[in-house]
Amino acid sequence: MAKNIIALFVSFYIFALLQTSFLVSFNISGIIPDAIIISVILINLFEDSGEKFGFLAAFIGGFFLDLFSSDFIGLHILILIAVSFFVKFILRRYVRIPTFQRI
Amino acid sequence: MKIHFRKYNFLIIILLVAAVLSLNFFKKEVKSFFYFVSAPVQKVLWEAGDNISDFFGNIFSIDDLKTENENLKIQNQELLAQIALLESLRQENETLNAAVGIGLEKEFTISSARVISKDINQDTILIDKGSEDGLSLNLPAITEQKNLVGKISEVFNHYSKVMLTTNSDMSFDAVIFNTQTYGIVKGEGHLEADFEFVPREAEMKEGDLIFTTSLGDIFPNNLFVGSIKEVERNDIESFQSASLQPAFDINDLSNLIIIVKF
């Protein structure tokens, strides 16, 4: 679990750095993809509803988005946790999505 | 056992929420620390991204560059003619000022800064100067060519956030250069801005140049804001508006000048 947390921390920090420096030069009409939000949605889409890892990803991803924005710390955390809830308990209930299974 | 486990989880959640909310009391210090750690990496990444996008941009836009080059040559000749006219007006103005005894134009006190990172989604950029370097809130930021970029919206010890003129919270008075028609520049987000509240009967066309005025005391006079892209006129409304092409290019912003006193 500790390894997963460290991996999330490092990955999202790198995504935040890329979004605010490298990817800026590749904007299309002033829009660049938000890698952190996309990652959080994908993590929640492909894990079981009972798993908690997606919420952890939402917390850490939201923290880094807050750090590099002008808003108060906690806003993006709240938003991403709400998105995780939506994906896990509403989208997954009504939309059939294949999940990876251990061999 | 299950209840104990749930209570344990609930406690962790409460502690996490409290920790996150308490961080807001030290928001500046926390953000300042992360900017300090990230700044060297972001500078390298930004330069790498800029070089790579320039390389591919040049390959894919040769035709556009040729057309743009021809248009710029024509525009350059028109501007040279305007400069010649303005130079004679300037000399006349100086003579009149000397005769009447009015003071000459004020000089700015300036400070230069490097751009560390950019957030296009929020139309802000981060620079490497802060309160310890004499910067404070609402100071104007311009390029070396005196094109208006924005104003300082947040100050840390060694860093500051600059709100671009295209930020949706930005609005200020401006004037069309040729016709002296006044209006309001309003940021629309995603590097776009509009020029609004221009009287319907006023003359405004594509290519008109917009400059700041000292009305509202937000920016000094005569900083270049941008040019009109497309005019939107409606017979019913009392005002007309236009979309603006900002004077700065987000991809070319590497150094800024902060006007500390005007």
Image: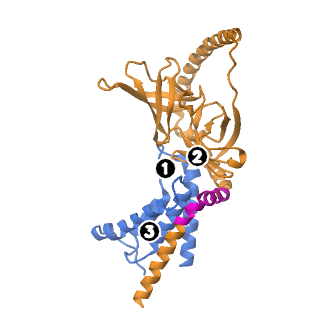
Callouts 2 and 3 in the same chain: no
State yes or no: discs 2 and 3 in contact (Cβ < 8 Å): no
Three-letter residue code for mark 1: Ile
Query: Dot 1 corresponds to which residue?
Result: A32
Query: Dot 3 corresponds to which residue?
Result: A43
Q: Is residue A32 left or right of residue B238?
A: right
Q: Chain of mark 2?
A: B
User: Is residue B32 inside the magenta stretch?
Assistant: yes
B249 vs A25, nearest the viewer = B249
Gap in Å between the C-alphas at discs 1 and 3?
20 Å
Three-letter residue code for mark 3: Ile
- Percent of width and height locating residue B248: 57, 35
Q: Which residues are magenta?
A: B21-37
Q: Chain of mark 1?
A: A
Residue at horizontal 64%, vertical 52%?
Answer: B156
Q: Is residue B34 left or right of residue A4?
A: right
